[in-house]
Image (cartoon, rainbow, N blue to C red):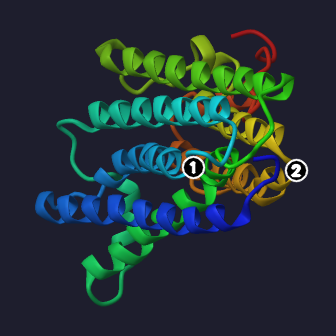
Amino acid sequence: MNAFDWGPFAANLGWAAATALAIMLGAFAIALNLDMHRIVDVAWGLAFAAVAVVTFSLSGGQGDPARRVLVTVLTVVWGLRLAVHIARRGRGHGEDPRYEAMLARARGNRDLYALRMIYLLQGALVWLVSLPVQAAQYAPRPLSALAWVGTAVWTIGLFFEAVGDAQLARFKADPANRGRIMDRGLWRLTRHPNYFGDFCVWWGLFLVACDGSWQAAAVSVVSPLVMSVLLINGSGKRLLERHMAGRPGWDAYVARTSAFFPRPPRGNR
């Protein structure tokens, strides 16, 4: 196979959409039983992992075997780590304030509103954002340097996510830090090491897709662009900083710490 085969890829798009929908509907059913919609954040990572595995199963004989394995492993590792981390973080806690605020604005049936605005919307985003994972597995060219550059970018991203999350968890677990702003470790370099990590993960996966064919690059470039907008100006950084505004020490932290891309802090701590 020397060319990007649009027919099997188009069929895969349908199966990927069905997979993301199934995961989100399952999460919705669990959320109704628990009366807690934060479960969807666990489903987010699981849905990406499931889409990668389904695409791997469907793309046999189509794309480069090494790229299929690489992009599947990278996505599954990222998705499962994120799901496990969020599940542990939410254990013993009530509803996420973001979803409480969203549902407070609901008109009509709150469950149907949650289904539309949380689960179906996130399912659609999983399908869209996972386009590099899908397209890469149908790309025919053997792995070359660009794929390893993408893997390196992905690795940087996973490091910032995993280490940043672990540092924040340890900080919050110490009662002496209650009410304080986390400004240690990676959090000295950026106010959002986890979001920056996510940014790198998806640009890295896009580079792996680019390495396979120009068609894979063209069809999937929307994914890292959309993810970047969400992380920086959408439901990521912007909403979290709105929630943090006004806390003691926050303004000083903002003044010395990069908003997104890591750099040494300004001035003295």
- The quarter of the image holding the C terminus is top right
Name the residue located 52 percent from the left edge and 42 percent from the top edge: 244
Name the residue located 81 percent from the left edge and 18 percent from the top edge: 266
Crowding at label 1, few (<14), some or many (≥20) Cα neighbours within 10 Å? many
Question: Of residues 52 and 172, which is closer to you in this image?
Answer: 52
SS type, badge 1: loop
x and y, in percent, of residue 22 in the image: 34, 64
Question: Of residues 142 and 99, which is closer to you in this image?
Answer: 142
Up the image or down, 111 lies above or below 250; here it is below
- Amino acid type of disc 1? Ser
Name the residue located 43 percent from the left edge and 71 percent from the top edge: 120
Residue 192 can be seen, yes or no? no
x and y, in percent, of residue 232 in the image: 70, 48
Q: Mark on residue 214?
A: 2
Q: Which residue is mark 1?
A: 59
Question: Of residues 122 and 47, which is closer to you in this image?
Answer: 47
Crowding at label 2, few (<14), some or many (≥20) Cα neighbours within 10 Å? few
State the residue lying farthest toward the left. Answer: 33
Up the image or down, 97 lies above or below 88; here it is below
x and y, in percent, of residue 115 in the image: 34, 74
The answer to whether 249 appears left or right of 255 in the picture is left
- Amino acid type of disc 2? Trp
Name the residue located 28 percent from the left edge and 38 percent from the top edge: 90
Up the image or down, 48 lies above or below 176; here it is below
Q: Earlier in the sequence, mark 2 or mark 1?
A: 1
